[in-house]
Image (spheres, helix red, strand yellow):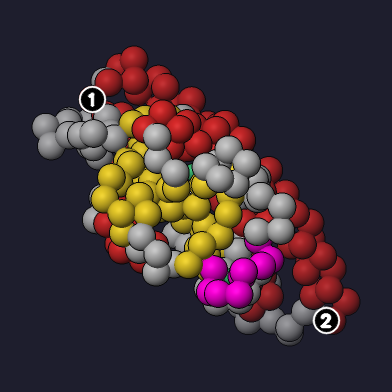
Amino acid sequence: MFRCIVWILSLATFALYGTSGHVVVPMTNEQLTEEVHKLEDLLKDLPGEVDELKTAVESVVERLDDVHPAVTRCPDGWIRFQSSCYGVGTEEVTWGAAQEICGRFGGGLVEIDNSAENEFVKELARSRGYDVLWMGATDAFSDGHWVWASSGRVVSEGFTDWYPGQQTGNDGGSQDCVATWRTCSDYRWCDGNCNDTHRFVCETRFLSFFPNDFIC
Ligand SMILES: [Ca+2]
Ligand SMILES: [Ca+2]
């Protein structure tokens, strides 16, 4: 990603000033088209580079655990899994209220990145005997177009676990918020009315919870 940003800045600088530092004649259409194609190629590589960065961060965090375990702590009562902390809200609230509560802890309703995290969240519900847990995706702004609300990531571009037909239907009502649901084939994803009240799962990165006395 950093490489891409540097490239964009370099391109903008070159287009305005050339290599001499003086304002020059703008690039021709052909030159611009060629540079745009180079940028498009770089953008295609971004998802892979983001995954590499995530892996690198997790590796650094594991090392931090050895050096100073307190650095990677989660808020009291939260559970660590991979590179996040998870809090299960035990009160039944609307989807919007749940998102607001998660925000007070610097996070949001859980966003599922992979099958391991999905299974972890399902087990949070199973082990507690909870039928439903709100998660962080909504299609409130465009029916059937599901987005993870905190990050803005498009749900269909990553891991999904929809119960068949759930991501497109509204069951005659307004079902714009997603939850892991016991009755949806053992906690697969179903949509529900955002104003219904359920328990919920928050997610936040644990690195934002540095202890007050931590000294670098
Ligand atoms: Ca996540
Ligand atoms: Ca909907």
Segment colored magenta: 167-175
Q: Residue 42, located in which quarter of the rendered image? A: bottom right
First reached walking from the N terminus: tag 1 or tag 2? 2
Residue 151 position, x and y percent, is 49, 58
Residue drawn where x is 37% and y is 32% of the image: 128
Q: Is mark 1 within 8 Å of ligand 1?
A: no
Residue 19 in sight from this viewpoint? no
* Image quadrant occupied by the C terminus: top left
Find residue 28 and name its label: 2
Q: Quadrant of ligand 2?
A: bottom right
In this rendering, the count of numbered labels is 2
Residue type, numbered disc 2: Thr
Residue at point 33%, 42% (across, down): 88
Pick the front one: 199 or 14: 199
160 up-or-down from 151: above or below: above
- Mark 1: few, some, or many residues within 10 Å (few <14, many ≥20)? some
Give the CA distance from mark 1 to mark 2: 56 Å
Q: Is residue 67 magenta?
A: no
**Type of secondary structure dominating the magenta stretch:** loop
Res 104 visible: yes
Whether label 1 touches label 2, CB < 8 Å:
no
CB of mark 2 near ligand 1 (< 8 Å): no
Give the side of residue 32 with respect to residue 184, left or right: right
Q: Secondary structure at mark 1?
A: helix
Q: Nearer the viewer, residue 51 or 202?
A: 202
The spot of residue 155 in percent (x, y) is 62, 56
Residue 70's disc is: 1
Q: Check disc 2 and report its element: helix, strand or loop.
A: loop
